[in-house]
Amino acid sequence: MKKSQLRLIKLVFILLLFTFIFNQKVTAQVVNGSNISGNLEVSAQYYTPDSAIGAPDVPESVLSNGFMNVNFNYQNFTAGIRYESYLNPILGFDKQYTGSGIPFRFASFTNENLKVTAGNFYEQFGNGLIFRSYEERSLGIDNAMDGIYASYKVTNGANFKGFVGRQRSYFEIGPGLVRGIDGDFQLNDMIKAWEAHKLRIGLGGSFVSKYQVDDSQSRILPENVGAGAGRFNLNYGNFAFDGEYAFKANDPNIVNEFIYKNGQTLLLNLAYTKKGLGARVNAKRVDNMAFHSDRNATGNNLNVNYIPAITRQYTYRLATLYPYATQPNGEMGIAGEFFYSFKPNTKLGGEYGTFINVNGSAINDIERVPIANDTLGYTSNFFAIGDTKFYQDFNFEVSKKLNKKNKLILTYLYQLYNKNQIEGKIDDKMVTSHIAVAELIHKINTKKSLRIEAQHLLTEQDHGNWMMGLVEYSISPRWLFTVFDEWNYGNKKAAQRFNYYTFSSTYVKGGSRITLAYARQRAGLLCVGGVCRFVPASNGVTLTITSRF
């Protein structure tokens, strides 16, 4: 037996042992109402060579990511730590994660009006346009703050937050010092005479600054960079309207190629909803808003802010071939959605009713007028739309329960995808694709169900046409079995018409979940909320265990 196979067997044994331990019904109550809680997650992948699909070589054969949170709570006091281990990081995660340690630890005190935290914490101001500290483990993002945080409720409807600290950068701390304050005011809760008013009004404002020493030999760089934001939300009956505007002082950095132009973002959302009917419109403009606590950082490392996507986040496999990633240097777009539920026992609703959803978006570059020999880089008319198209999509979905045991979902999706802009490619054509999806959910009995998907993607660009089929069988509440295959049958290069198949099984008991899968994974972007990471092609076995206690 090969050494790599022995290592895999040992790792599987250790993971199963951890699961057994943490799945036991251990009483976590200590004395006087204190308690200990936490969770564990470990994912290990065993890789086999597959140069045909471009899978990189993995000398270690087995790579793994894992963490465990342990929290202690006693009355108003909470403390916790998180131990993480990447030995070595799974493909697609930055290699700077390599190693083990305790990058997250905190102590917090909370009473009726005050919360104070020392150590690591996550927080977001408004929509995150000037500050968001968060974790998205699937993307390898963790920009946790390390410092002091406090929030205080002044009165009903009036809350303040403030912090000072540095951001996590893998197993280190970034060089920039970040400070911020936020106020949120719900006027109907603050003003007694407005309590019963149908119009609900909320206002808020934030200010964040980052400090970093000017270490340049060729430029004079600002050491303090400030950003401010104001927001509102209005609710009246079935209508909701909210928005936020953010402004950032000149912040020359590697992402904007060290120009000294100010940055700004405007985000607007309008929605109407009532039983069985809804519509929304979202608009966004972004100009030079890459904001890192280290001016030399790129990608998802040391991001101070977060610019949410207004495009729909798709879950069907072929629809995720071309996902949209927010462009912090500049974008301008609009998105809309309409849904309606036809009532049961009507002509269009049938016996069980019919649900339709229509969704679309269009994202372009902003207008840019270059300024020769000027450190500002360019000027831009706030209301002018650039000629370069980044992304467009149109989605139409019909969902209908056919009878007591069967439900059918039919989806059509059109996408226009600027591969050069979004993926940083050179000389790739704009990708235009049409996707059709049919999903059938069959309820066998009260515990067993079957889900079947058939998908087809049609395009003349990139890798050509794709087909995909999926079968998923579940036995509630313990088992889930899934088989699917993506076939790039339309690739212009016959030798690259690969099948990418996956076989997986999941077992759930109590607070534990074990998934074992074999997959031939295609390369591509994995995106959550407009933030993405590249996942390289791979071939092998994955074991994932999660448990809470």
Image: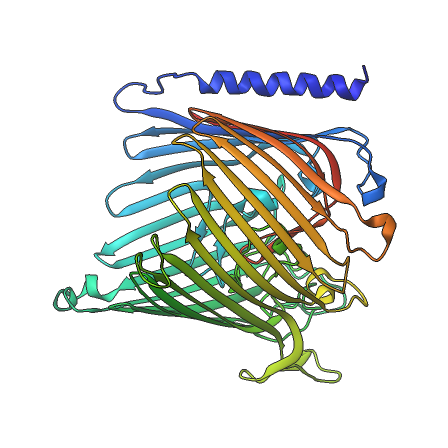
Q: Relative to the observer, which residue lies in front, 189 or 63?
A: 63
Residue 403, position as x, y percentages in the image:
39, 46
Q: Quadrant of the C terminus?
A: top left
Q: Quadrant of residue 290?
A: bottom right
Name the side, left or right, on which 318 lies relative to 131: right
Depth check: 449 or 28 in front? 449
Residue 177 in picture, x, y percent from top left:
55, 54
Q: Is residue 7 above or below residue 152?
A: above
Q: How is this picture coloured? A: rainbow
Number of callouts? 0
The quadrant of the image that shows the N terminus is: top right
Q: Position of residue 515 (x, y in %)?
A: 57, 29
Work out whether 370 lies above or below 239: below
Residue nearer the viewer, 358 or 114: 358
| Residue 323 visible, this angle | yes
Q: Which residue does the image show at 68% across and 73% down from the upper left?
A: 259
Q: Quadrant of residue 55?
A: top right
- Describe residue 125's horizontal placement relative to residue 262 as left or right: left
Question: Does residue 156 lie above or below 447 as drawn?
Answer: below
Residue at the location (41% across, 30% down)? 447
Identity of the residue drawn at 48% across and 43% down: 441
